Amino acid sequence: MTQEKPVLVATEADDLTADMVITELNRRSVPVVRFNPADIGAGLTVSARFGTCPAPVVGQVRTPSRTADLTRVRAVYWRRPEWPAFSHLEPDNARFAAAQVRYGLGGSLYALDGPLWVNHPLRIAAADYKPAQLALAQRLGLAVPPTLVTNDPDEAREFISAHDEVLYKTLRWTPYVRSGVPVTGWTEPVTAAEIDDSVRVAPHLFQARVDKAADLRVLVVGRHTFAIRIESDLLDWRKDYSALTYAVDHLPDRVNSALLAYLERLGLVSGSFDLVVDRTGDYWWLELNPNGQWAWLETETGLPMSAAFADLLTQGDGS
């Protein structure tokens, strides 16, 4: 029975998105075992056996209030788990212990082939490379703005000079602190005159600016597509959420089909896509976040996103 099989939810302690999905699972009387890898020790125990029993993996994940039999897991919702840092240990011991958790706890869970993963962390990691994203988008027929990834200053200047307006984007978000203050790498305009030899230090992503009418955040959950049009005067709408207005959008069939095919190619069952619509009504690809945020969009639009996740997780392995 569906009700006998739990859904594992791996996430950090404060996660509104996970809370919304768990609430929906509770309404369906689906048992949930929520855990955070950072709680390993008294707050989290894992045991897994291999090669000594009929099933390839036998074991348990236990928290102080819940236990999940690894042979009976229906689905795994891999949201925003935190890995332990072991700050109380000496640096070498901390690195060693952290690696054992990632490859012990993580590896035991990754070995499961019965549950549905939303999404499998190894597939999330593989899907998170922007150059590969751009190439796959173009292969699937999506419009991709002219883009250059380079650490060659001369090539960067040439590219920028060849286009009316060019934007600089980070290739990967990373925590960054400057003078004790956390900073974020926003999408910013860049000119050829700003390019100097420091570009050689690492690859940079430069992209021709689309004359956009609006941004779109598109959440795909299984075969359900939720497209939200985001309007503002901002180049990067993430800078000020209070300046945004939202409207439900409906994608052209060919765009929707391409996004579904995109996830299928990557072995994902869900993803948050960023697109833009230009002033002629054409849709342009920007990027995929395989584990993106969406909870605020459900609040703003009333779209049943958390219910769609709960439906997918409840379905699980289909038994």
Image (tube, grey):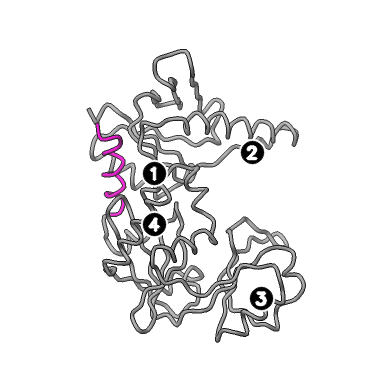
Quadrant assignment, res 181: bottom right
Read off the residue under disc 4: 262
The residue beneath circle 1 is: 118
**Could you tell which of marks 1 and 3 lies nearer the N-terminus?**
1
Residue 209, percent from left and from top:
51, 79
What's the CA distance linking mark 4 and mark 3?
29 Å
Image vertical order of residue 223 relative to residue 83, above or below = below
Find the distance from the CA under tag 4 to the CA under tag 2: 34 Å
Q: Nearer the viewer, residue 91 or 23?
A: 91
Q: Are marks 3 and 2 in contact (CB under 8 Å)?
A: no
- Secondary structure at badge 1 equals strand
Name the amino acid, label 3: Ala
**Image x and y of residue 273, in percent:** 41, 61
CA separation in Å, label 3 and label 2:
38 Å
What type is the residue that disc 1 sits on? Val
Q: Amino acid at mark 2?
A: Ala
* Residue linked to disc 2: 85
Q: Is residue 120 magenta?
A: no
Residue numbers of the magenta segment = 305-319
Disc 4 vs disc 2: which is toward the camera?
Answer: 4
Q: Position of residue 129 (x, y in %)?
A: 54, 56
Q: Marks 1 and 2: CB-CB under 8 Å?
A: no
Q: Please tell me which of labels 3 and 2 falls first in the chain.
A: 2
Which amino acid, by three-letter code, is at mark 4?
Tyr
Give the distance between the C-alpha atoms of the residues marked 1 and 2, in whole angstroms. 25 Å
Label 2 Cα crowd, 10 Å radius (few <14 / some 14-19 / many 20+):
some
Main SS class of the magenta portion in the image: helix
Asked which secondary structure carries label 4, the reply is: helix
Q: Position of residue 87 (x, y in %)?
A: 68, 37
Q: Is residue 243 above or below residue 184?
A: below
Checking the image for residue 156, the label placed there is 3
As helix, strand or loop, the secondary structure at mark 2 comes to loop
